[in-house]
Amino acid sequence: MKTIIEPFKIKSVEPIRMTTRAEREPLLDEAGRNLFLIKADDVLIDLLTDSGTSSMSAEQWAAIMRGDESYAGSRSFFAFEAEVKRITGFKHVIPTHQGRAAEKILFTVLHRPGAVYLGNTHFDTTRANIEFAGDTAIDLPIPDGLIPSKYHPFKGNIDLGRLETALGEHGPKVRAVIITVTNNSGGGQPVSMENIREASRLARKHGTLFIIDSCRFAENAYFIKRREPGYEGKSVLDIAQEMFSYADGTTMSAKKDGLANIGGFLGVHDDALAVEARNLLILTEGFPTYGGLAGRDLEAIAQGLREVLDESYLRYRLRTIEYLVEKLQQNGVPLIIPAGGHAVYLDAGAFLPQIRPEQFPGVVLANELYLEGGVRGVEIGSAMFGKRDPRTGAPIGPAMELVRLAIPRRVYTQSHIDYVAEVVIAVHARRTALRGLRMTYEAPFLRHFTARFAEA
Ligand code: F0G
């Protein structure tokens, strides 16, 4: 059959509150034209993030009832630990309340004066935790990774040539090489096994650690199966195990490929590193057998990790994104190609060439999608990453102006996706009429969350 169906039936439903454009206009005005300040009940299709927004399965809800809430030595911890070890092979598994908590612990423990981290593209919380420790994060994506309209099967790869040069340049200051799978900030694009293997070899040759940010490891593994010669016949579990076999450690947000609403972990092999990490964990998260989570959360993650490796699930998952990308492309909508694993990234710069980066084309586009059809995406551009020159006050823009439409796992059906395509295509048809915005309020850091806008 040609149609790839959702490989599940729906047992429990959550109603969507329907609204009209006339109702959404004043709501957006009251929110200072910032979609982060809109109530979720006023959104029809919420594509703000794929993080913590998955639907849980009947088996996960059943596992929640089995949760053992003992403070120490909880049975649920051992179920969680066994599942993480089966997939990743790490000797030490340290639960945390979400991905950034694992990052905070790892980068605090690894900190040395002048430390440097090299990666394909550090996600914002990864970079923020490295910089908060006083250290430096350097992104080394392959050049094709920064060109939205260019096809490359593994656009998330790290540039191995620049990695080798940087390893030589920074010498022992490099505390780790970090590969993020899939590369969220670069379009949800996968990293090939060959690239992971080589980056790991270079890291080890230079005596530094090799870490995988594994939030979306199952999506990455399935891309490898589909696109990398030699992996067609392997199971996704085998591929994931091979990916982790090259690493000294991993940070994971279980809110993505853990199919859970909260949770994460740090995995490492080194005994001394694990002792230091656990000591910090006790200080900030909790006892090592729960780490900031309830026993029931650990059960939900253990079950989620089993389900996420199911190939009919992954086939449907990746097809959803690809289907939306194909529909939009056929209608001339500019976006990042090929389709990534968890989101569609509209190229707002090319969509609205009449709006200069200082007038936030991504915010304008995201707002129009909301007004048109109640669809909420997120701007990844000048509002989120733009900075001001400390001397002149002039704006310094990021590399791309994007709007990310992240697809929650197992939440929306094909007709929801058809609807989203219709909304984007309708906005595209009247794109020349859209005008820029100016920021009327901005906080000193992470300004995109609370900024307010008005017509420029
Ligand atoms: N690493 C990557 C690649 C991520 O995408 C995220 C979160 C994190 C780390 C941090 O994990 O949220 O559990 O603390 N990404 C979400 C997003 C927020 O919308 O892309 P967390």
Image (spheres, rainbow, N blue to C red):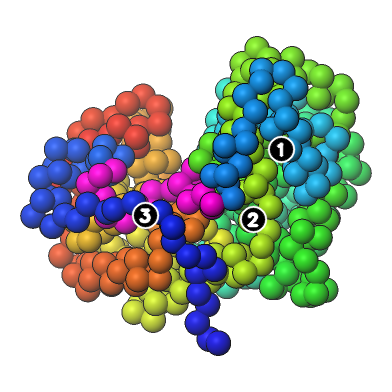
| Residue 337 highlighted magenta (yes or no) | no
Q: Inspect the image, locate mark 1, and give the three-letter code of the amino acid beneath it.
A: Phe
Which mark is on residue 80? 1
Q: Main secondary structure of the magenta part?
A: loop
The residue that disc 2 covers is: 307
Q: Residues within 10 Å of mark 3 (few under 14, many from 20)?
A: few
Q: Quadrant of residue 166?
A: top right
Q: Is residue 44 magenta?
A: yes
Asked if the residues shown at circle 3 and circle 2 are in contact, with their CB atoms under 8 angstroms apart, the answer is: no
Q: Is residue 126 left or right of residue 212?
A: left
Judged from the image, the secondary structure of the residue bearing numbered disc 3 is: loop
Q: Looking at the picture, how far across and down is residue 138, in whole percent?
A: 64, 40
Extreme-bottom residue of the structure: 1
N-term-proximal mark, 3 vs 2:
3
> Range of the magenta residues?
40-58
Q: Which residue is mark 3?
A: 13
Q: Residues within 10 Å of mark 1 (few under 14, many from 20)?
A: many
Q: Amino acid at mark 3?
A: Val
Q: Secondary structure at mark 1?
A: helix
Mark 3 Cβ and ligand 1 under 8 Å apart: no
Instruction: Determine the CA span between mark 3 and mark 2.
Output: 20 Å
Q: Residue at x 29, y 43 (%)?
A: 40
